[in-house]
Image (cartoon, rainbow, N blue to C red):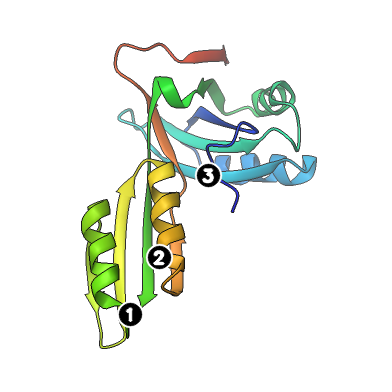
């Protein structure tokens, strides 16, 4: 499994104007250039004029400097920051449906250990959710796979600089 914390992955926080089509242009840029996106999340900021796109990029597909240079060519990009794991708070959400016919107690123990939540229960399945650091989500998913995941969905990573730490601002537009 490719883990978002790999050294070949970098997290970019891209502040963009909150206008229709911006996300499509960013995704199109990555597709045209053959850049690999590991994770992508977007939402408006506290200022309704802007949205923040958190992109985890695979720098093996292209150098980080090249990716940033291409992003800044997009008209609606205002600022790009690189968020290192030690200087940021990162979170992700996973929802998984697990086959639990014979091992329900073991799955419930994992849910308890990881402080996950049970969302739905049937005779042979459990749907669980977990919010946390990407590495915690990875570990939980690996352990659930031993029990048989029927379906899984993970959000993209979201991240903000830790309070009191200045992120590496690559450039502002």
Residue drawn at (53%, 31%), measured in percent from left and top?
A: 11
State the image coordinates of residue 87 (x, y, percent, origin top left): 41, 19
Q: Secondary structure at mark 2?
A: helix
State the image coordinates of residue 131 (x, y, percent, origin top left): 31, 49
**Cβ–Cβ below 8 Å for labels 1 and 3?**
no
Position of residue 36 in the picture relative to residue 91 (left or right): right
Labelled disc at residue 167: none
Please report whichever mark, 1 or 2, sits nearer to the chain's N-terminal start: 1
Label 1 to label 3, Cα distance in Å?
A: 31 Å
Q: Secondary structure at mark 1?
A: loop
Residue assigned mark 1: 100
State the image coordinates of residue 19 (x, y, percent, origin top left): 49, 38
Residue assigned mark 2: 144
Position of residue 171 in the picture relative to residue 128 (left or right): right
Please report whichever mark, 1 or 3, sits nearer to the chain's N-terminal start: 3
Residue density around tag 2, few if under 14, some if 14–19, many if 20 or more, within 10 Å? some
Look at the picture and state if 143 lies above or below 92: below
Q: Secondary structure at mark 3?
A: strand
Image quarter in which the N terminus is found:
bottom right
Q: How many marks?
A: 3
Label 1 to label 2, Cα distance in Å?
A: 10 Å
């Amino acid at each position: 499994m490719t883990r978002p914390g790999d050294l070949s992955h970098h997290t970019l926080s891209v502040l963009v104007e909150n206008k229709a089509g911006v996300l499509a242009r960013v995704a199109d840029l990555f597709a045209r250039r053959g850049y690999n996106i590991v994770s992508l999340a977007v939402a408006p900021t506290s200022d309704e004029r802007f949205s923040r796109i958190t992109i985890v990029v695979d720098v093996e597909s292209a150098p980080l400097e090249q990716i940033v240079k291409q992003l800044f060519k997009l008209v609606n990009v205002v600022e790009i920051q690189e968020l290192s794991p030690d200087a940021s708070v990162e979170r992700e959400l996973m929802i998984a449906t697990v086959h639990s016919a014979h091992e329900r107690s073991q799955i419930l123990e994992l849910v308890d250990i990881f402080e996950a939540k049970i969302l739905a229960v049937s005779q042979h399945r459990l749907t669980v959710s977990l919010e946390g650091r990407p590495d915690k989500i990875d570990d939980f998913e690996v352990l659930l796979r031993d029990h048989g995941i029927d379906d899984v969905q993970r959000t993209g990573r979201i991240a903000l600089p830790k309070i009191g730490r200045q992120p590496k601002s690559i450039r502002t537009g």
